[in-house]
Amino acid sequence: MRRTLEGKMIVLAVTGSIAAVETVKLAHELRRKGAIVQAVMSDAATGILNPESLTYATGRETIVTISGHVEHVLYCGDEMAASLLLVAPCTANTIGKIATGIDDTTVTTFATTALGSGQPVVLVPAMHHSMYRHPAVVRNLKTLEEFGIDIIPPRIEEGKAKIATIDEIVLYAERAVLGRPLAGEKIVITSGPCREPLDDVRVLTTRSTGQMGRAIAYEAFRLGADVTVIHNDHFPAVRNIRIETAVEMKNAVIGMIDEGISVYVSAAAISDYAPERIIGKIPSGTEQDIHLLPLPKVIDYALAFPSIRTIGFKLGDDAASGGRDLIQRGASLVVANPPSAMGSETAQFLLMTEEGEYMVHTKEEVASAICRHLL
C-alpha cells in the first residue's frame, strides 16, 4: 500500500451518530496510509463510543474537552499543526451549528477555528434519509459547500442513507491534503470489459477485471481531477457512466468529448468484435458457427482531437510495436502489457512516450506514472 498521507496530521472529529463506531477502523486506515491521527470527540459522541477506543486506534490521547493547551488553535489555528479537519461522522445537528457559526462543542470549536484559518475541512454526514431531505439540512449543506468544505455524500441503499465507506472517506482525505495538482483537468477513463450479446442469454467478453481503470480513477481523483469512468461497474467518489457493449462505450466517449474533456484514458478491454446477434437462446448441445463483426476503435475518436491528451493501452505479444504506432498517431502516453496482466495486480508494464520508454511492475505504479505525466 502506498503511504500517500505520510507525515500528514489529520484531526478526526467525531460527533454523536451511531456511525461513530466505524471511526476506529477509519483511524486505522488513515494511519496505514501514513497519517498521524488526532481524535476529537463531542460529548454526545462519547456516549456512543468510549474515547479510549480512539486513543488506542490513534496512539494519541483523544480530546474530549478544550483545555488550557487550546488544542483547537494548536491543530487548526493559523499555525495549522494539522493538514486536515475530518468531521466523520457529522450529525445534522453539528452541520447546522457549523453552517450558522454556533460553537458549543469540542467539534464545533475545531470547525470554527479551521474555517477561520483556511484549513481544509472534509465533512461526512450521517443521518436518516428523511433528515437529508429537510429543507434546513439541504440549505446548511449548501452553505458548508460555499464555505469550501468538501461534503462526502451518503450511499443510498435499499431506501436508506448510509455513511460513506471508509475507502471513500480516505480518498477524500487524500484529495484534500495532496494539493490537487490535477485540479481543472476533466479526465474520462474507459475501464473493464465490454459484453457483446450472442443471443438472449449469452455474451462474449474478456477476462478484464477493471483493476487498472480503478487504480487510475482513484489516483486522478485524489490529485484533484474531475473524473468520469465509463464502464459496467461502480467506483465511489467519481462519476460513473454505466455501459455494456463497445458501441455503448463509444457513444458515451463521444458524448463526453462533446461536453469537453482534457484527458482520455483508454484502459478498458474494449471489444474488437461483436458476434452477429441471434434472436432467442441457442439450443444447448448444438454446434454453432459464430460470425464476428469488427467494431470501430474507440480511441480513434479521441485521437481525432489534438486538444485531448490521450492515454492508450495495448495488450498482447505485439503490444510494444502497437503502442509505438499509437504514439506516432498522437497518443500522449501508451502502456503496453502482456495478457497475463488481466486479473493480476503485477506484470511487466512498458510505458511509452515521445521522450522514451520505461518499465513499472504494478497497476498502482502505472496509475501514478500516468498522473505524473499529466502534471
Image (cartoon, grey):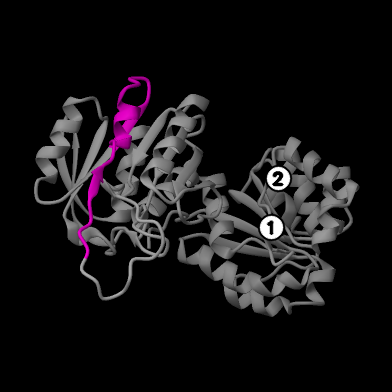
| Residue at 69% in and 75% down | 21
Q: Which of label 1 and label 2 is nearer to you? A: 1
Q: Is residue 230 left or right of residue 120?
A: left
Amino acid residing under circle 2: Gly
Q: Nearer the viewer, residue 89 or 216?
A: 216
Q: Position of residue 152 (x, y in %)?
A: 66, 52
| Residue at 34% in and 46% down | 368
Q: Quadrant of residue 150?
A: top right
Q: Position of residue 14 (x, y in %)?
A: 73, 64
- Measure how far apart labels 1 and 2 are at the Cα level: 29 Å
Q: Mark 1 — residue?
A: 154
Q: Mark 2 — residue?
A: 77
Q: Looking at the image, can residue 354 be seen? A: no
| Residue at 35% in and 21% down | 305
- Does dot 1 land on a helix, a strand or a loop? loop
Q: Nearer the viewer, residue 124 or 74?
A: 124
Q: Position of residue 313 (x, y in %)?
A: 25, 43
Q: Start and end of the magenta stretch?
A: 288-311
The answer to whether 219 is drawn above or below residue 305 in the figure is below
Amino acid residing under circle 1: Pro
What is the quadrant of the C terminus in the image? top left
- Does dot 2 land on a helix, a strand or a loop? loop
Q: Is residue 312 left or right of residue 279?
A: left
What is the quadrant of the N terminus in the image? bottom left
**How packed is label 2: few (under 14 Cα within 10 Å), some, or many (20 or more)?**
many
Q: Is residue 239 magenta?
A: no
The answer to whether 23 is drawn above or below residue 275 in the figure is below
Q: Is residue 308 magenta?
A: yes
Q: Is residue 160 left or right of residue 36?
A: right
